Amino acid sequence: MRKSTVRVAAAVFALGLFAAACGSDSDSSATEDTVATEDTMATEDTAAPAVDEVAAAKEAAAQAVTIPENIALTVAASATPPTGKKVAWISCELPSCPEVGEDWPAIAKLLGWELKVINVKSFEPAPGIQQALDWGANYIAISGSPIALYQAQFDAGIAKGVKFTSAYTTDKPQGVDGGIQGLLTTVGDASYVEMAMKSFAPWIIADSNAAANVVMVNIRDFPVLVSEEEAMKAGLAAGCAKCTFDVIPVTIEDLGAGKVPQAVASYLQEHKDVNYVHFAFGGLPTGVSAALKTAGITNVKLVGGDFSAPNLQEVVDGTHAAWTSNPKAEASWVMAHAMVLDSLGDTYTEERTGAELQTFIVDTPEAAKAILDGGGLQNWKGPKTQADQFKALWNIK
């Protein structure tokens, strides 16, 4: 892995990306003169569909906007987990890390485990992993940083019997074909992104009355975002014969330089049939709604995946139409569940279920405001009673 790529991954994760992952560098620029787009029809025009696309999409979308009340995991631990285990949470310096790790103190207290929070730079986690090993951690949880960045420490930990959990990377855990032994789970990986987009596509189909011309703003340097793109394209193709799909590829450098708003405005001025702009993650549309207003561009809905507080505020203000959630705090509960099962010698049969974090769509000002007014980090942490539900799974009275 090239160090420059790692730095880009860290920057994307800072903006609340679904998952920071390793990818190749890109020299494309999202300026008005150089933005490249890839025209793709979601599907070819066909005869009148045999099914009512709008009705089918509305039924699926109605389920997608429902806030989950229960965790997805159902298989309980075989016994109450042993107390006294030592777990290290490797917390990066970026804004997304506190959202992922905010419940670790509550988790450790519930389990009777000793917690050590170790702060690291997201693209230099190896010293923090080494500190956790020196402390005598039984389990190490980390988010956003692939194992390649701390391979030597990972190997040393595995040799000592230490187990790892990861969130928002593309590292394959044990139990998956080609998985890494000692990595108990990878939460919020590509499978989660694919699931989230396949549930979001029906919302767009229903909202557009099966007449959506979608352009996605994406950073293709990251495999997990390519997975998101492919899933959205596939979801539209599966449910809408005449919907179209295109991509505005941008780079992290474009984002940092504030070039995305102009890139989107320029594209829409040239493609007047587009009525939906989909953003791969919450940091991408900063300044876009204002740029479109200045350019006099209307009748285009802005939507995206993995909302942050500014996106929710734009839903409240009416400048964004809909966003999917990303329950980062739930990721830590799921990682802890993998540790609990391991501590008892149980097989984690639901690992892939847990990896696909639950999500829903926020598409009304009322729903967005309710989350913003909830305080804390202004993100949906997971089902309200998830702590009690995990407590029950762990046989803790």
Image (cartoon, rainbow, N blue to C red):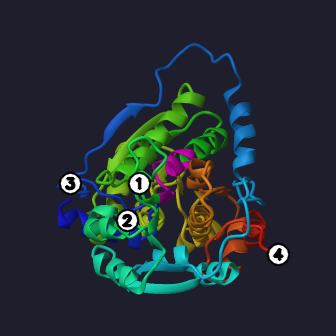
Could you tell me if residue 1 is visible in this image? yes
Q: CA distance from mark 1 to mark 4?
A: 32 Å
Mark 3 / mark 2, whichever is N-terminal:
3
- Whether residue 334 sits left or right of residue 144 in the image: it is right
Q: Which callout, 3 or 1, points to the residue nearer the camera?
A: 1
- Whether residue 212 sits left or right of residue 137 in the image: it is right
The reply to whether the C-beta atoms of the residues labelled 3 and 1 are less than 8 Å apart is no
Q: CA distance from mark 2 to mark 1?
A: 8 Å
Mark 2 / mark 4, whichever is N-terminal:
2
* Three-letter code for the amino acid on which mark 1 is drawn: Gln
Q: Nearer the viewer, residue 325 or 181?
A: 181
Circle 3 packing at 10 Å, graded few (<14), some (14-19), many (20+), is some
Mark 3 / mark 4, whichever is N-terminal:
3
Q: Which residue is mark 1?
A: 181
Q: Nearer the viewer, residue 40 or 252?
A: 252
Q: Which residue is mark 4?
A: 397
Q: Helix, strand, or loop for circle 3?
A: loop
Question: Which mark identifies residue 26?
Answer: 3
Q: Which residue is mark 2?
A: 158
* Three-letter code for the amino acid on which mark 4 is drawn: Lys
Query: In the rendered view of the protein, which quadrant contains the C terminus?
Result: bottom right
Q: Which callout, 2 or 4, points to the residue nearer the camera?
A: 2
The reply to whether the C-beta atoms of the residues labelled 2 and 4 are less than 8 Å apart is no
Q: CA distance from mark 3 to mark 2?
A: 35 Å
- The residue that appears at 47% across and 74% down in the rendered structure is 96
In the image, residue 283 lies at what x, y percent? 43, 67
